[in-house]
Image: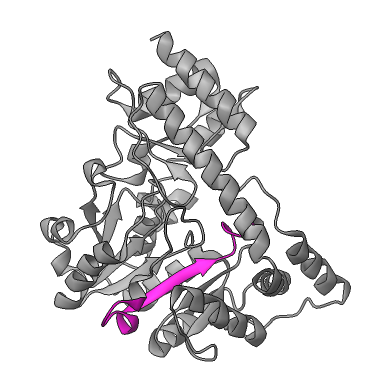
């Protein structure tokens, strides 16, 4: 008789567990842990959004919504994204999803046939590669470089063979590095995509968290709107991670294809979260700006302290991550992270978890409070002094 493991698909067997998870599990076993590994704001969602969610429940608004999401929410999203010079029809070009992650998965399955190649810059958020694989596609890893502040370039794409791909994933501001791209830098990527007919999946979940200039979407560049799907959501800027709500913006044919898959899987995004999101977009810009300013204060502190204690850290200008190098004498980022958590009770994520180009670095989230960040950096400094 065959057991359950013998019945699993090859794809499931070959999917590795999250590399981040191991360090969370180590942290859960220890007392007095400071975790700088979680990509989650330490703020609560703005009160107005929470109140709207409560009100919707008290009024018994617990039914399904339209597959695409509530129309009033889609209309408000369409109005909201004009701040990034984006313009989309709420009836045909916007899909509300269960987190931005679901939207990315839907787009992959709508675009990728078995054997298709998808270019994924590295280091990058850990879910992109598996979603390509779940769709039957092959990942083309495109390495970005610390000496270039992890900006994706035309040469990076060409060197990696991305011209043979059918699609390109883009994530700026970037998780895990905190890197951002200017309009001029994005223009190189757009040129490559047009020349080689690549469709672009642009994850812009951190668009509201830029600290020195305004966010630019690649979809606004010449010839890119009809070959780009933009993803965003409410988890990061609005501190609504647990409400699981995101959205996709794109050409009507692409949104229709994604929605057909969405109908058979998720059906519709969480109704309560949609009411919260509607209020967040209508009245919570001030709360978002307060959080952004606090993240910026933490960002400047963390970058300064890492450089001060001898861990080279480029100036990340977006999201809420920095990506310092391991200190001299430590070539193995995983070994460094494990020693640090065991000896000083500070949890960081090894950079290699996020793909090629991440080795020798550490992802550090400054979404924790300032007191925790100060104590964590003091502990890291103490650890280095004893080595």
Instruction: Report x, y in % for residue 132.
Output: 34, 63
Instruction: Report x, y in % for residue 5.
Output: 45, 49
Considering only vertical position in the picture, is 90 above or below 347? Answer: below
In this view of the protein, which residue sits in the foreground, 330 or 11? 330
> Would residue 60 appear left or right of 41 to someone viewing this image?
right
Residue 164 position by quadrant? bottom left
In this view of the protein, which residue sits in the foreground, 221 or 26? 221
Considering only vertical position in the picture, is 251 above or below 59? Answer: below
Give the tally of numbered discs: 0
> Would residue 241 appear left or right of 231 to someone viewing this image?
right
Q: Is residue 281 magenta?
A: no
Residue that sits furthest to the top in the current view: 386
Q: Is residue 340 visible?
A: yes
Q: Residue at x 43, y 63 (%)?
A: 214
Which span is picked out in magenta?
220-241
Residue 165 position by quadrant? bottom left
């Amino acid at each position: 008789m065959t057991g359950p493991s013998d019945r699993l698909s090859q794809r499931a067997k070959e999917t590795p567990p999250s590399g981040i998870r191991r360090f969370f599990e180590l942290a859960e076993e220890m007392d007095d842990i400071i975790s700088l590994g979680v990509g989650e704001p330490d703020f609560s969602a703005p009160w107005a959004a929470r109140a709207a969610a409560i009100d919707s429940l008290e009024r018994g608004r617990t039914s399904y919504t339209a597959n695409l999401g509530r129309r009033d929410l889609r209309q408000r999203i369409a109005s909201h994204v004009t701040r990034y010079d984006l313009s989309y029809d709420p009836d045909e070009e916007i899909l509300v999803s269960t987190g931005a992650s679901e939207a990315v998965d839907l787009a992959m399955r709508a675009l990728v046939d078995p054997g298709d190649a998808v270019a994924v810059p590295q280091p990058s958020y850990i879910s992109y590669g598996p979603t390509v694989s779940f769709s039957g596609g092959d990942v083309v890893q495109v390495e970005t470089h610390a000496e270039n502040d992890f900006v994706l370039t035309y040469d990076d794409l060409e060197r990696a063979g991305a011209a043979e791909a059918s699609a390109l994933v883009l994530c700026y501001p970037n998780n895990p590095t905190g890197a951002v791209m200017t309009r001029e830098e994005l223009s190189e990527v757009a040129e490559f995509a047009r020349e080689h007919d690549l469709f672009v999946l642009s994850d812009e979940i951190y668009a509201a968290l830029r600290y020195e200039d305004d966010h630019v979407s690649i979809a606004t560049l010449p010839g890119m709107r009809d070959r780009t799907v933009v993803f965003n959501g409410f988890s990061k800027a609005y501190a609504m991670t647990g409400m699981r709500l995101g959205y996709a913006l794109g050409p009507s044919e692409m949104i229709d294809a994604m929605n057909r898959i969405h109908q058979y899987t998720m059906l519709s995004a969480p109704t309560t979260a949609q009411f919260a999101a509607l209020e967040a977009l209508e009245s919570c810009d001030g709360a978002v700006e307060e959080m952004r300013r606090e993240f910026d204060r933490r960002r400047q502190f963390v970058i300064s302290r890492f450089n001060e204690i001898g861990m080279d850290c480029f100036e990340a200008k977006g999201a809420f991550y920095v990506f310092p190098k391991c200190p001299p004498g430590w070539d193995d980022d995983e070994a460094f992270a494990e020693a640090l958590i065991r000896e000083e009770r500070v949890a960081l994520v090894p950079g290699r978890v996020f793909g090629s180009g991440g080795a020798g670095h550490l992802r550090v989230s400054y979404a924790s409070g300032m007191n925790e960040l100060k104590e964590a950096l003091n502990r890291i400094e103490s650890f280095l002094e004893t080595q």
